[in-house]
Image: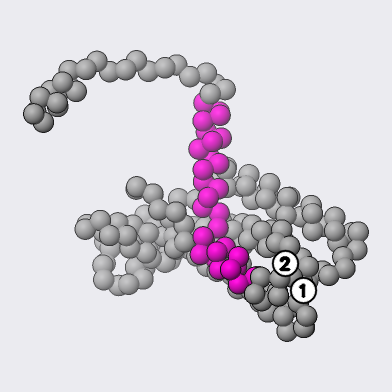
């Protein structure tokens, strides 16, 4: 039965390739680049921030100086997490299990240490200047996300001036456009801790 199906499938003529216009090609590349934007932030850092922020800020009221300092610490800790997790990567071992590692100048250092990579395999994951740029952009995007959180704004700027309101409205948008454009032009190839897994 299976052999018959395979024979029938093999005998089918190939579908003719459609000629795509330049507009379709550009649109396809833009949509493909936009899909890379999901790799901007580690999901764990964002979820941790979203869960802890209302508790630490007391729903944006921040009744004490301590709660304001804790809010600042939470934003800094999550932003630092985004920065550091940009240097992690993953691969599948021969059994198909996903393994995580830390990118270094000499290659990938496997975190659990149960597998050793060959020098050639390690070389594929070497740390590059672009990784530092991605880490900085990831941290900036997280700061922009935190600036859009009403609890953080109400806590740190209870009575903002007009200039502060303009800054808090415009700066996240500018950061999003700049960092989004950067990631569209220079997409990350890393699939680190907290990033979506792919079939690769």
Q: In the image, 193: left or right of 99?
A: right
Q: Nearer the viewer, residue 59 or 184?
A: 59
Q: Which quadrant, please, contains the N terminus?
A: top left
Q: Residue 153: percent from the left, percent from the top?
A: 76, 65
- Dominant secondary structure of the magenta stretch? helix
Q: Who comes first in sequence, dot 2 or dot 1? A: 1
- Measured along the vertical axis of the image, is residue 18 above or below residue 70? above
Q: In the image, 199: left or right of 26?
A: left
Which stretch did the figure color magenta?
25-53
- Secondary structure beneath label 2: helix
Badge 2: how crowded within 10 Å, few (<14), some, or many (20+)?
many
Q: Quadrant of residue 148?
A: bottom right
Q: Which residue is mark 2?
A: 151
Q: Which residue is mark 1?
A: 61
The residue drawn where x is 73% and y is 50% is 173
The residue drawn where x is 30% and y is 72% is 113
- Measured along the vertical axis of the image, is residue 175 above or below residue 194? above
Q: Is residue 115 located in the magenta-colored stretch of the structure?
A: no
Q: Residue 159: percent from the left, percent from the top?
A: 88, 68
- Secondary structure beneath label 1: loop
């Amino acid at each position: 039965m299976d052999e018959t199906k395979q024979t029938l499938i093999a005998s089918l003529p190939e579908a003719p390739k459609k000629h795509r216009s330049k507009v379709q090609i550009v649109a396809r590349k833009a949509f493909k680049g936009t899909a890379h934007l999901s790799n901007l932030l580690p999901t764990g850092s964002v979820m941790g921030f979203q869960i802890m922020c209302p508790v630490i800020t007391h729903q944006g009221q921040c009744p004490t100086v301590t709660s304001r300092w804790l809010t600042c610490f939470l934003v800094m800790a999550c932003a630092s997490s985004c920065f550091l997790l940009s240097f992690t990567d993953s691969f599948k071992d021969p059994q198909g299990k996903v393994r995580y590692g830390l990118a270094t100048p000499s290659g990938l250092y496997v975190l659990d240490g149960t597998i050793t990579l060959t020098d050639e395999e390690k070389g594929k994951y070497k740390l590059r200047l672009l990784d530092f740029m991605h880490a900085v952009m990831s941290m900036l995007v997280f700061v922009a996300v935190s600036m859009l959180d009403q609890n953080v704004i109400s806590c740190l700027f209870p009575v903002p001036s007009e200039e502060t309101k303009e800054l808090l409205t415009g700066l996240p948008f500018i950061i999003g456009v700049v960092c989004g454009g950067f990631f569209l032009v220079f997409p990350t190839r890393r699939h680190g801790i907290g990033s979506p897994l792919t079939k690769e």
